[in-house]
Amino acid sequence: MSEGKLLLVEDDADLREALLDTLLLAHYECVDVASAEDAILALKAQTFDLVISDVQMDGIGGLGLLSYLQQNLPKLPLLLMTAYATIDSAVNAIKLGAVDYLAKPFAPEVLLNQVSRYLPQKQNHDQPVVKDEKSLALLGLAQRVAASDASVMIMGPSGSGKEVLARYIHQNSSRKEQPFIAINCAAIPENMLEATLFGYEKGAFTGAYQACPGKFEQAQGGTLLLDEISEMELSLQAKLLRVLQEREVERLGGRKTIKLNVRVLATSNRDLKSMATSGEFREDLYYRINVFPLTWPALHQRPADILPLARHLMTKHANAFNIQPVPELDEVATRRLLAHRWPGNVRELDNVIQRALILNNGGLVTGQDIIIDSADVAQHQDNGQPESAIEVEGLGGELQAQEHVIILETLNQCNGSRKLVAEKLGISARTLRYKMAKMRDAGIQLPA
Ligand SMILES: Nc1ncnc2c1ncn2[C@@H]1O[C@H](COP(=O)(O)OP(=O)(O)OP(=O)(O)O)[C@@H](O)[C@H]1O
């Protein structure tokens, strides 16, 4: 799920690329431009949740962009990046309306922390849509657990709705007026996770020019979701356990302890219990967070959810694309949705519905609008439909398709052993898992 849409304005191409990688890895949708003038063009064409801009650039520069925003989009937050020597001008810019500044050079975690602080919280999160008896029972249980202050472990395959359930628990708890802060432990590079969680004081490490509160502090009074907790390294797990036991946190490089009043929820799409048994996950931490386990079945195991979810997603995206009236599904389309196994679960269904809306020419959504895998795309083209189907399927383009083929071939050669595949491809097991999850989301069947 995209965490928000950012506009990045930086004239140094190398730095821009590095910043872009950091932001994309953390699940932000990001448009990057090299000047304030290009930023204004982008702002006229698209809507953003936050702008991050260098101060010194040719042309009107970051301060010119600030004055454009003040006049035209006063609610859009602007985060400035500036060389250490020109901090005075950044401080002045804050007086003029910028929300904050980052002193260059800064570490990636500094960027991510600042972004998460100033990105407006999205209000239109999905309420869980459920119809199947299994899901109704799960939701009923979640509602009862929400009323307690217990830690909850939400399990289920990738894309099944774990984050949706976590927000539901928060919304149904006495903490609902307080912040809900989510952190994806798999998306944040290992060396940044600790600072992001616990915060840091000025000077704690190179590039830490300002003190920054961590996610625990940001969630004070509310709920903290540790998404994909299984991806946290053992050494950090030990530190997390201490924070949970003591109910207090110490920022990196700090000496002050900060008392915490935070409810912790966690998600995992891996079997944490067996990871705890095999020593990959700390057993004591497992028991600490697993006070109340909740598990989403895979989507194909709760078939009565498929159509209500499809209609909900259709309405959601039709509204976003300004398509009225919301198209209905015809009988063949309905059958196709019910017959598929949905290895990527609700996220895959979401992608399929978005494609269907793009392909639909008005009126009922037909079986031909339901593009589930690449064979469907070819068929769709043979039928003289618009070429956009290929672009939609292409998503990440040629390069990504090749990467998928290489991963599939290597999985075959290694008889499905993830460990061997990661070694052979020269990537970490964690990166491989991340890539495979993305492939599943795109509807690619992978060996179990
Ligand atoms: N029951 C549901 N009702 C409405 N929308 C849902 C439901 N379940 C999932 N979704 C939608 O499907 C997408 C994936 O859901 P979510 O991010 O909660 O899954 P996840 O299990 O946390 O995924 P991952 O394992 O990749 O972190 C989101 O866009 C979410 O809004």
Image (spheres, rainbow, N blue to C red):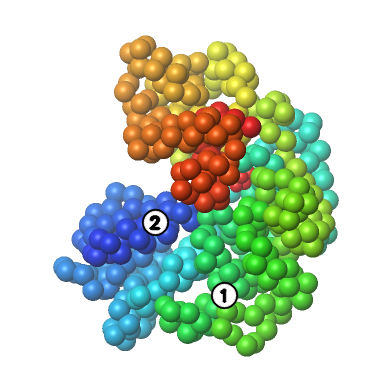
- Mark 2 lies on a secondary structure that is helix
Q: Of marks 1 and 2, which one's residue comes earlier in the chain?
A: 2
- Residue 300, compared with residue 253, is above or below; it is above
- Front position in the image: 293 or 448: 448
Residue 442 x/y as whole percent: 50, 34
Residue 439 x/y as whole percent: 51, 36
User: Mark 1, residues whose alpha carbon is within 10 Å: few (<14), some, or many (≥20)?
Assistant: many
Q: Is residue 69 left or right of residue 134?
A: left
- Residue 218, compared with residue 377, is above or below; it is below
Look at label 1 and name its amino acid.
Gly
The response on whether ligand 1 sits within 8 Å of label 2 is no
Callout 1 touching callout 2 (CB < 8 Å): no
- Front position in the image: 55 or 270: 270
The quarter of the image that holds ligand 1 is: top right
Q: Residue at x 45, y 18 (%)?
A: 376
User: Mark 2, residues whose alpha carbon is within 10 Å: few (<14), some, or many (≥20)?
Assistant: some
- Mark 1 lies on a secondary structure that is strand
Q: Residue at x 42, y 78 (%)?
A: 207
- Residue 130, compared with residue 32, is above or below; it is above
Is residue 291 visible in this depiction of the protein?
A: yes
Q: Is residue 282 left or right of residue 119?
A: right
- Quarter occupied by the C terminus: top right
Residue 21 bears which disc, if any? 2
Q: Residue at x 36, y 83 (%)?
A: 91
Residue 199 bears which disc, if any? 1
Residue 121 x/y as whole percent: 54, 59
**Residue 341 position by quadrant:** top right
Q: Is residue 150 left or right of residue 67?
A: right
For the residues marked 1 and 2, what is the alpha-carbon distance in whole angstroms? 22 Å
